[in-house]
Amino acid sequence: MITLLKYEIYRRWKWLAIRYAALIILGAIFFNRASASPMQYDIIAESMGKFFLISIVVFAIIIIEGINMLKEDLFEQSGYLTFTIPKKGRTILASKLTLLFLQLSLWTIISIGFGSMFFSKFPYQEISRITTQIDFSFYPTILFILTAFFNFVLMVHLSLTLTKTLLVNKRYSSLMSIGIFFLLAYLIEKFYYGPFLNQIRHAYIEFGTTSNVDVLSAGYTSVFMNVVLSVIFFSATAYLLENKINI
Amino acid sequence: MEYILTTRQLSKYFYQKKALDKIDINIEKGKIYGILGPNGGGKSTLLKLAAGLLKPSQGEIIIDNKNPGVYTKSIVSYLPEINYFYKWMTIKDALNFFKDFYDDFDMERVKESIEFMKLEEKEKISNLSKGMLGRLKLTLALSRDAKLYLLDEPLNGIDPVSREKIITSILNAFNKKSTIVICSHLIYYIEKLLDYVFFLSEGQVISAGEAEDLRNEKGMSIDKLYQEVFQ
């Protein structure tokens, strides 16, 4: 898998380097601006806001690329190269997901790192006030977000794989796979998360009062449920890639 | 007789169209086979099934006593008709890719072949002409010490000089431990290579036999016979 991962990185290393260099450089520029304006909290907050906006854009790019990594091999001619090497479907898929995981980890480290630096510019009392008002656990929240996006990417992977496997001879296979994606999303929300976390639709964060972030307050339970779903999606996609591929 | 590839009632449908219709063929070890037929006859589909890129709709395909999978991919060297390389690759990257993923890839053989084919390792694949690309694909496919080589239209779009080089390379790579299956409609150039031929049309084998026997029996070359069969 390491060799496949090497080629996944090699395929897109320029974009990876540009992406993270841009995030770090822009973070440094905004932080420098914030540092140059001590006690001017509106400027610090504005710089922090701009950085997080860029960070969210990079996050979106990572997710789209995570989807495209498999889509390219399924729908473009390079699939002939990828799917004729003597590797199992799960190894091919795992190499792509490992790169996605590495990217998300790097993004998390950079974003949290700069976030902490920006926060350090606020007065200590203000930071303490905010942290006591936000009633959610830090690590389960981060893990929940990461696993939720993994689930999302894997669900898209499964839908895309279906168009090139079980649905390949059906008319409108692409439309059907989109339909399957939404059906899966509905079924999971209704029958999987629903019974356990039926408050999910009412989640919100409110500063200054007690928070009501039910899915996050479910903590590691929701993370565990995400992991179970990821394993199911991964196994199904890997099986289809290895045994039913038609490209 | 030992067979490297066998199909039993092999069919492949795309929507309602039958690309292959209940094909039964046996490919013996240590020979060069030609699968000949017009475009759309099912030649490429047959090779893609053997390469593990397609799954049969009905019937089965057996390679070295196994269904297509990880093992068969390790012993089958497949040359597709298309440009299947990643866009970022140089020739050197492609060599390294093959070296990394195929245990039977022979670096010495590929170096010789690169020189013979007049290819430059630092050249970007996306910048290669069709002839150069054809030479590169063949160089990579034949530099593996595979049990079965599947060559899909290796001469398509190739200039006459490159064609000669390609034919010479195929002959050089062939040994009695390996088997070569060539799909082509450019029979004139490959005829001298072939031990056995299948004529494939509309997904069915309409004629087959030892190349020499067919020539003697019909009193004409395989190229002429092809023209007669498909006219």
Image (cartoon, coloured by chain):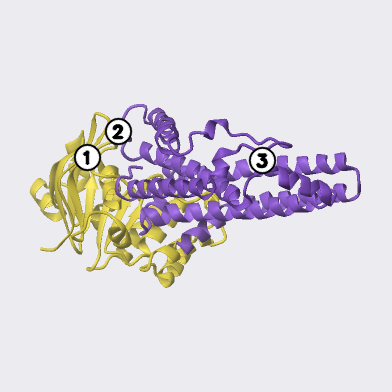
Q: Which residue is mark 3?
A: A57
- Give whichever of B36, B108 is nearer the camera: B108
Quadrant containing the C terminus of chain A in the rendered view: top left
Q: Where is A206 relative to A124, above or below? A: above
x and y, in percent, of residue A216 in the image: 57, 43
- Badges 2 and 3: C-beta atoms under 8 Å apart? no
Q: Which residue is mark 1?
A: B57
Q: Residue at x 32, y 53 (%)?
A: B151
- Which of label 1 and label 3 is nearer to you? 3
Q: Amino acid at mark 1?
A: Ser
Secondary structure beneath dot 3 equals helix
N-terminal-most mark, 2 or 3: 3
- Badges 1 and 2: C-beta atoms under 8 Å apart? yes
Visual hue assigned to chain B: yellow
x and y, in percent, of residue A4 in the image: 47, 59
In whole angstroms, how far apart are the C-alphas of marks 1 and 3? 44 Å
Q: Which chain is purple?
A: A
